[in-house]
Image (spheres, rainbow, N blue to C red):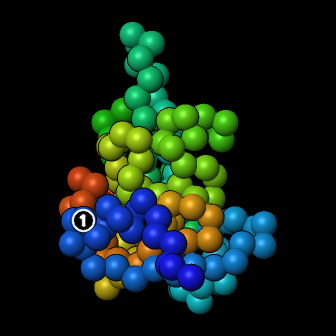
Amino acid sequence: MAEQKTNVMRILDKAKIPYEHYLYKSDGQIDGVHVAEICKIPPEKCFKTLVTSHTEKSGKKEYFVFVIPVAQNLDLKAAAKSVGAKNVEMLHVKDLLPVTGYIRGGCSPIGMKKQFKTVIHISAENLDFMTVSGGKIGAQVRLAPTDLAMLIGAEFADICEKK
């Protein structure tokens, strides 16, 4: 049986970015900590992709993407500050597919319908590797954080809630 490549993997191949992929059987649980356990990835190296929105005074919506460790929570104030917005709010799950092209649990910062301004949590900057969704439930890709940032034009910032 031929290996099933996701769009994320094809984009990485085209950009000649080295990566490894993990395919796993989904048991219905899609939270990142559970995915890290299944794939035997340390949770501090397994990242989730969160999409937020901001409505400008004109009524125009802007979208921002934040990539944070699976066991952490996004600090909305710090996130807004990192993208130069007054505030941001989490995108409603029903809007995720129309805005990004991805469903909850399979949202990757790579290959969205449009490349939105993206911020990766600063903890990734010094890691040898990180994993993010491979673009569907049941797929993760492992790559260097600097390669991810370069590919999607992301910056690193401290955007997680303090514990």
Q: Check disc 1 and report the residue beneath it.
A: 14
* Amino acid at the residue labelled 1: Lys
Residue 119 image offset from top left, x and y in percent:
35, 53
Residue 117 image offset from top left, x and y in percent:
32, 43
Exactly how many numbered labels are in the figure?
1
Q: Residue at x 23, y 53 (%)?
A: 153
Give the vertical position of 10 relative to 74 (above or below): below
Q: Residues within 10 Å of mark 1 (few under 14, many from 20)?
A: few
Residue found farthest to the front:
1
Residue found farthest to the bottom:
40
Residue 46 image offset from top left, x and y in percent:
50, 75
Residue 16's quadrant in the figure? bottom left
Residue found farthest to the right:
28
Whether residue 90 sits left or right of residue 5 in the image: it is: right
Q: Residue at x 72, y 72 (%)?
A: 26
Q: Which image quarter is the C terminus in?
A: bottom right
Q: Residue at x 70, y 77 (%)?
A: 25
Q: Observer-nearest residue: 140 or 5?
A: 5
Q: Which image quarter is the N terminus in?
A: bottom right
Q: Observer-nearest residue: 16 or 83?
A: 16
Q: Residue at x 31, y 36 (%)?
A: 84
Q: Is residue 33 visible?
A: yes
Whether residue 17 sits left or right of residue 121 in the image: it is: left
The kind of secondary structure element at disc 1 is: helix
Q: Observer-nearest residue: 56 or 137?
A: 137
Q: Is residue 78 visible?
A: no
Give the vertical position of 148 relative to 84 (above or below): below
Residue 97 image offset from top left, x and y in percent:
57, 41
Residue 125's quadrant in the figure? bottom left
Give the vertical position of 113 relative to 124 (above or below): above
